[in-house]
Amino acid sequence: MLKIALLFMLFSLFSNSIYPQILKIDISNIRNNKGVLRIAIFKNSASFNKDEAFSSKNICKKDIENGQFSIAFEDIPKGLYGIAVLDDEDENGSMTYNFFGYPQEGCGFSDYYHTGILRPKFDNFKFHFYEDKTVVVRLRYY
């Protein structure tokens, strides 16, 4: 009986690496095919405030159709996260602002449609990731 319990515990510990969870991100409202989508996954407000993503991907937009794109991450461990997406149309690596300080490129956050012009708080778009999950990011242009 003890051997069975021990085997069950070992299986539980390693099942995460054998059967990883899938984090799918559905991005919508992409305005055009210029530039790249910069997808950043943050672990907490400190990493978000410092722009230090836990994981990130840059996606060329030339083949995106109908203003929508989906991507799956299979290497993300269980935990608390927040996703930010920048539509970097001019490919300069950061948000571009106009003379009045308004963003000129689109951005979006995990399951949160940001309506302000200032950077949102991590708590607004954080989520728990413990099993397969789909997160929706709707880009907003100002």
Image (spheres, grey):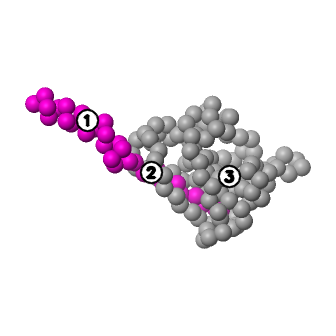
Q: Nearer the viewer, mark 3 or mark 1?
A: 1
Q: At 77% across and 53% down in the image, what residue appears?
A: 92
User: Which mark is first along the chain, 1 or 2?
Assistant: 1
User: Looking at numbered disc 3 in the image, what kind of residue is underneath it?
Assistant: Leu
- The x and y percentages for residue 12 are 28, 38
Q: Is residue 25 above or below residue 63?
A: above
Q: Specify few, some or many for label 1: CA neighbours under 10 Å numbering under 14, 14-19, or 20 or more.
A: few
Q: Is residue 71 above or below residue 49?
A: below
Q: Specify few, some or many for label 3: CA neighbours under 10 Å numbering under 14, 14-19, or 20 or more.
A: many
User: Looking at numbered disc 1 in the image, what kind of residue is underneath it?
Assistant: Leu
Given residues 81 and 93, the one toward you in this image is: 93
Q: At 55% across and 48% down in the image, what residue appears?
A: 111
Report the Cα–Cα distance between label 3 and label 1.
Answer: 41 Å
Quadrant containing the N terminus in the rendered view: top left
For the residue labelled by badge 2, is the local secondary structure a helix, a strand or a loop?
A: loop
From the image, tell me which residue sits under label 1: 10
Instruction: Please give the range of residues in magenta.
Output: 1-30
Q: Which mark is residue 86?
A: 3
User: Looking at numbered disc 2 in the image, what kind of residue is underneath it?
Assistant: Glu
User: Which mark is first along the chain, 1 or 3?
Assistant: 1
In the current view of this chain or complex, which residue is farthest to the left? 1
Q: Is residue 58 visible?
A: yes
Q: Is residue 140 visible?
A: no
Q: At 59% across and 64% down in the image, what residue appears?
A: 68
In the current view of this chain or complex, which residue is farthest to the top? 2
- The x and y percentages for residue 51 are 67, 39
Q: Which mark is residue 74?
A: 2
User: Which mark is first along the chain, 2 or 3?
Assistant: 2
For the residue labelled by badge 3, is the local secondary structure a helix, a strand or a loop?
A: strand
Q: At 53% across and 40% down in the image, what residue appears?
A: 81
- The x and y percentages for residue 46 are 63, 31
For the residue labelled by badge 1, is the local secondary structure a helix, a strand or a loop?
A: helix
